[in-house]
Amino acid sequence: MIEQRMQNEADVFLKLKLPAILIFKLLCHHLHVVQHHWKARAGKFKAVTLCYWALLVLDGFDAEGKYVGDCILALCHTFCSFKWGLWKVVVSAAGHISVEEKGDLPFPICIMTDDGKVNSTQNVTWPHLHLSQWHIRRAILHLDQAIEEALAAQQVSERKVKLEEVTSAAYVAALRSQPPPPPLSPQASTSSMPALPSAVAASAAAVAASAAASPAPPLGPPPPAPPLNGGSFPFGRETGVIIAPPHGTDDGHAPVIIILPPSGGFNLRKQVQGGGLALPLNCPRPCWYAYMNWHGGGWKKPLPLEVVQFVQFVKTRAKNRALIGWGLSRGAKWVIELVQGHRLLDAAVIFAGYPQTKCEHEQRASAQELINIRNCAIFMVHMVADECCGVRSFPFWHAEFERHMADQNRQSSLLSLTLSGSHSTAYPIWLNWEVQAHPVFNQWFEMMWERLVLTH
């Protein structure tokens, strides 16, 4: 289809559309709208199928005087507003794409291929569509940052290095597996090679003799990733800090605690003078700590790209160590974003967290996404009289967690605990690691810690 479009000189804006579609597909991949490679499709879109729909949208988009960013924004808005329940997309074998009434087709989403005979999205469910639209709407608020995060999550540089290492190793192995060429006969060697000057011939003979006496060692495995070390590491204008455990307490499996502070950061300068919020470094088990003292922005600020890059930096060096998020208030919201959008954490402890917006649908969708996560152990601590992040501010979000905890047959890695107190009551629990004071919290913490240490 792309080749057909390239040959169609009438489509003068194709060079504008294709980059927009590729970036939109990358964003959908990062937000788990489409199926990931080597993973079960489940209820997600196929990437190529969504590209058909995107091409249809841009065919009807007035691209005169527009840029690639305008096309990406149009795709995002249209994905959220498209009447999927009423319309179907039909892709013909000749490469023509049209939109028609769905009629009595029973599927929630209908993108029909093979001249409209096969529904390539018959597995996509309404809950996944609504959750995908919620992710896209959230990305629109900071689209440039969302695209940068999606690109950073692909780890292009690391994959390029690994590909070059694999290619080099395969090339060397192929060379070694080939039999050596037969030696030239004396006649052939003297007749086919030009005579060398005597000084050059003597030098070449000396080099050959030296090489035969000490052959080059065989190529070893590629160098390992840098180890995890304590220190300060710049990321743009911010600095990530890694703190190693006391000498002799790390058995090689101690997890890394990713500390994410509330709005205002740790106020470390005031802390030296006797005020400000201290660092929560009182974990009852040996561990590493990693934090970025991000103090700018308000409670609605999305997870910064620098924080994501720092956590990715820690994860590549942590190797067999688990990563545990430990966030309070806005830091808890960022932990949620790390869990939902980046899959970088093995466990997450969320104190007085909250969703991105107060929209009823988005509150419920965010809660359900957390409940359905299986690859990260999640413990949420809510305060019953929280004036900022409690039931009054986000009723539908809390209602989903209450319904989940009341389900006796629940199958989820998420536990939700509501304690007495206000928003400020959560601060000392988070700051001082008051795990043992709450039996349910303590039991979950002990089980989580043992499992992560044994499985990493």
Image (cartoon, rainbow, N blue to C red):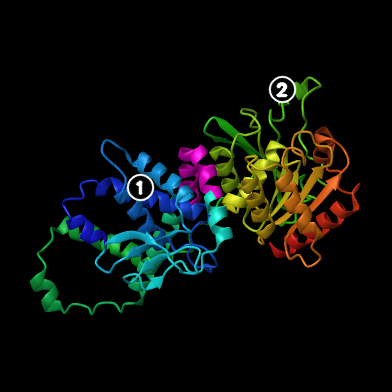
The secondary structure type at the circle numbered 2 is helix
Q: Is residue 103 above or below residue 278?
A: below
The three-letter code of the residue at mark 1 reads: Ala
Q: In this view, does 258 lie above or below 423?
A: below
Tell whether label 1 touches label 2 (CB within 8 Å).
Answer: no
The secondary structure type at the circle numbered 1 is helix
Q: In which quarter of the image is the N terminus?
A: bottom left
Task: Tell me: 8 left or right of 240.
Answer: left
- Mark 2 to mark 1: distance in Å? 45 Å
| Dominant secondary structure of the residues highlighted in magenta in the image | helix
Please state which of residues 181 and 282 is positioned toward the viewer in this rendering: 282
Category of crowding for the residue at label 1, using alpha-carbon neighbours closer than 10 angstroms: few (below 14), some (14–19), many (at least 20): many
* Residue 53 magenta-highlighted: no
* Residue at left offset 38%, top offset 67%: 112
Question: Mark 1 — residue?
Answer: 20
* Residue at left offset 67%, top offset 39%: 291
Q: Which of marks 2 and 1 is nearer the N terminus?
A: 1
The picture places residue 19, in percent across and down from the top left corner, at 33, 48
* Residue at left offset 24%, top offset 67%: 94
Q: Is residue 228 visible?
A: no
Extent of the magenta region: 134-154
The three-letter code of the residue at mark 2 reads: Arg
Task: Tell me: 178 left or right of 413.
Answer: left
Please state which of residues 192 and 206 is positioned toward the viewer in this rendering: 192
Question: Mark 2 — residue?
Answer: 269
Q: Can residue 339 be seen in this view?
A: yes
* Quadrant housing residue 240: top right
Q: In which quarter of the image is the C terminus?
A: bottom right
Residue 200's label in the rendered image is none
